[in-house]
Image (cartoon, coloured by chain):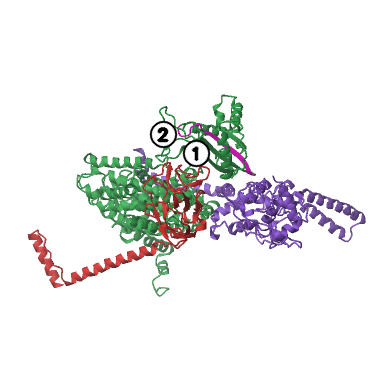
Chain colours: A purple, B green, C red
Amino acid sequence: MNLQRMLVERIESRILVGTVSFLLIMVLVGWIAINEGGRMQAFERQYTARSIERGAGMFATYCSECHGLDGRGLTGIAPGLDSPFLFGHDFLAEANLETDTLTAERDAAGTTDARKAEIETRLSELVTERQAISTSLQTAVDRGYNPEEPSRLVNLGWGSTLYTFVFTTLIHGRPVSESYWPRAMPAWSQTAGGSLRDDQLNDLVTFILNWDKGEDWTVEDANAVNQYPIEPSASGAALENAVGVDTPTETIVAELVNYVGDPNNGQSLYNGSLACAGCHLAGIVAPPMAGTWTRVETERLADPLLAGYTGEQYLAESIIHSAAYIAPNYQNLMPANFGARLSYQDLADLVAFLETQE
Amino acid sequence: MSVLPFPSFLDDVKEKGLRRALYEGINSVVERFTAGMNVQDLREALRGDPPSRKPNPRLQPHADGFWLHMRPSYFHKSVTGLYPEFRLGWLSTYFVFFETITGIFLMVWYTPSPQVAYANMLAIMANVPLGQFMRDLHRLGAEAMVLIVTLHMLRTFLTASYKKPREFTWFSGIMLLVFTMVLSFSGYLLPWDQLALWAVTIGASMVEAAPPEVVGTNLNLLLRGGPEIGANGLLRFYLLHVLALPALLFVFLGVHYYKVVIHAHSLPPKEENIGEDTAKRVPLDKRVYFIPDVLTSEIMWIGVTSLILVILVTWFFHAPLESHADPQVTPLGTTAPWYFLWVQGALKLGDKVFWGIIFPTLYVVVLAVVPYVDTAPSRRWAHRRFQLTFAFGMIAMTVILSYMGLSEFGVVTSADSEIINEMVKEPAHNHMGHIRPVPYDELRSGMYTTRQFEAGMGEEAEVVAAFNEEIENGEQATAATTLVGFLEATHHLPVTSLNFTPLPDDGGELYHVLEEFGMAIEARPNELPNAWGGVIITDVQDGLKRIDVMIVWNDYVNENGRPILNENGQPTLVRDAEGNPVWRINNNHIFIHENSQYFSAPGT
Amino acid sequence: MTTTAVETKVSTAQARTAPQVQVAAPNRREFLYYIWGASMALLLGEATATIIWFSLPRFKEGTFGGVFSFAADRVPSVGSGPLNVPEGRFWVSNSDKGLVILYAVCTHLGCLPKWVDVNFRFECPCHGSKYLIDGTYIEGPAPRSLDRFKTTLTFTDGSTVVQNASGDPIDLAGREIASVAIDTGTRLKRDGKV
């Protein structure tokens, strides 16, 4: 066979084949080496993309129940993550910067009076502009946003990156807050007793950080967030005329007669700062808001345990002393601190609002 | 009088002149390095001239040097060609060292711990120059080594080289084959990806079948370091892979090669009289000296093999790396490595103990005892009809069993799971779900149904509209309500109602994938009666879409997942109390990012 | 030594003349060598045993492979779905047949079946095997029902029940559970699709 003769019998062919092999290997390794930079970049980009995909899958499975399927949070349950606040976008940054520059120029020695007047005009314009921005953010403000303090990390005094903030939060979770957050965030890392591995947490964080719009965050984005993080202390200050956690139901009922409830205010309390709607929504963790009054009148008051109750009395007791009666098929998950957070007027407003839910 | 108190190079210079002294000095250094050949001898060897002095200086390195003392100084002319050896033994040895070296380089970047092993892999791929190259070479080398060693065994059998006096050489060779396979297999786990974890889980679970039960259970615990493969298992496999098995392999390699040298390479059968072994008695005119002939061809074969490996890893082969190992999720279609497929195939024949343990052991034992059973003196093919038939029988059986070991063979999957998996599965074994390679721009958000393909040309809109109506109020209403609830509660897809739109037939890849999906469902009418498929594409983030693939069908009476057909050849539907068919639903979803490149990027 | 040499000579001579084998009874030294060899073999055996013991993993309570115990309040009520305990790879399933702890791995090819509440059954995502809430095989390629972990129940009246070897659900018979102990090191396999 020719191959036999060529490769094996003639020693010169062997030397030639060997040389050509070695040279070709060198060329190929060189070719691979030249392309290494691009290859590594491409791998990184592709891997990050797939990491986001996996993170998205886990977010839907594990996180969406509290943080919402769109990541914008659920009122009273958990803050939004698709939010300019998390990424520290400052809507006032431009106006603030200009204000600071102009103020410095105005106060500097040697600025002509004409220029000063010009600056003053512009400064008053800027005040209007800032106000306009703040006003446009009103929906977000109602949900806990403060345009003057636009960064979660800065507010917390977090010393490291956003990545580590999210990662650390995922590892250990967050405790319930007596005054605001009724549900704890569980620890997710296996090291902290959760169910996810570190690489899975990494995927999740990559997905969450992929919401960052950089400079392109809009006021609409901010207003679309259902819930902003609220410092427990901010709404936890004791009310002076609070009902009181330990006040007996009879006293409350006797006192409540003196107040006329405003259903509209009750509704805003219900959906807003008290965040009742967070749990009393779909009837999964707590009885749904819809049909509350009908249910009270037809079902609850029919229960022998509640013999002699009026509807108002039942509602007032359920809000202040939630453990007194547990609705069938539910557990007692309701915070017991509403007595400290509500005045009698607030309580009357809430009851009035619930009476409209037929 | 010498310049120094002992004879030195300077004395030589004084005596013979610089030029001559230098030449002689170099000459003696070269002679020391080669253990016996000076410059003149080397050049004669390279020129192809016969040696000019006696005794033959080309034999000296074999006698005096360490490295060449283990190589024969000459070979028989008949064994230096391609036939009968094809250099397979030499190449096997080459791969042992090739794997050792590339393996040591990879160890630089590797820690055997489930927490970091996979991250190490990513770092090797993404942040180590030539990291992928090294990994590909090591992986390809491992697979090539299994192949080459197997071919080496086959060649030895065909030329009957296992016969007296080489029985033990064959036996040690079989041991080396086993070690090679186990070495390769133990390395499978180290990347700690899904492929690794589950291939090794399947392999290691055979150990569990070893009778009696107490032995199997404890062997399994010893090997895995726990009831399932975790940190301990990874460490144990790592130690086996880098320490225990290589040590054993090198010991047996020493034994094997010693036997090869003392018995010499067997000559082609037709060159010897029956029953003779003349390999050691090489007539002068048949001698091919190691220096330079055999050495040249050995280095040439190294060059050619390395070149083939490098060409393969440059364009054709990349070591697989799937997603991170997850003990909670078994990928569909998990198989053992290809060289263990025959065991996996055998396992499908029945009892785990017999087919998983006894049969493979028997297989190896049969191979190992071949030379002690087949003691007939003749090595001629004509006299070995039975042995050759036996060999081809074994080969055929191994191939068939390996085919049966493929996941495509014999693993029953319910039709709905299988079709959905075909659509969405993660890339593995060079396959991936049909939807993944659809270009990102063509994944238009919306709801699509396979019902549109039941329409004639141009009637898609009406058919889909009618189907929507059917979902709203018609016979599909219950199914649709359940489906929506299922999607929302179980799969966390925020849909409140179904409203399908027809895909235009210029819809590109997505259209074809949907069409394929429809045909796959239609092809299994008995297992998926009255079925329809749906695809829902939603936006999640910029550059990230979610794709839900679902099948809705009528439940039917079945046995072991196969429908029981009535006399018309139709499946018997399960009906509820009102006599309506019961709807069943299966859904799976994936996310696709625009940079994921499941499809090839434009321009590449 | 002299004797040995003489014996060797004799035996070679005998071998040359008569091919039959003649071996002298072991003398004292040879016997001592045998004893020594036997003790070496025994030592090796012991060494192997200790090394196996050394390498065998041990399982603490609360880790997979060891015993899990938990209080009655984690046991789901009859009619609700089973409780997944991923760290122990098992499901706690309570149905009208009684309480049974199911090993979470499919008996077909080792995937993890999911609990699908809509269909109220376990469904394996890989090859579609389905199981009832108590682990009984319904359909699909699986060769047998889900495996169980050996369970010991302690009731509030102080009595205990140990699960039988075929892994049948433990009938509570109206008694109230005080605590459950699950041995994840002992897997009970069903005899088929029952």
Q: Provide the residue span drawn in magenta.
A: B526-541
Image quadrant in which the N terminus of chain A is located = top left
Q: Nearer the viewer, residue B394 or B281?
A: B394
Q: Nearer the viewer, residue A176 or C112?
A: A176
Dominant secondary structure of the residues highlighted in magenta in the image = strand
Q: Position of residue A101 (x, y in %)?
A: 82, 56
**Residue B235 lies within the magenta run:** no
The residue indicated by pointer 1 is: B422
Residue at x 56% of width, y 24% of height: B456
Q: Is residue B256 visible?
A: yes
Kind of residue sitting beneath label 2: Ile
**Chain for mark 2?**
B
Disc 2: CA contacts within 10 A as few (<14), some (14-19) or many (>=20)? some
Q: Position of residue B240 (x, y in %)?
A: 40, 58
**In the image, which disc is placed on residue B564?**
2
**In the image, which disc is placed on residue B452?**
none
- Position of B165 compared to B540: left or right? left
Kind of residue sitting beneath label 1: Glu
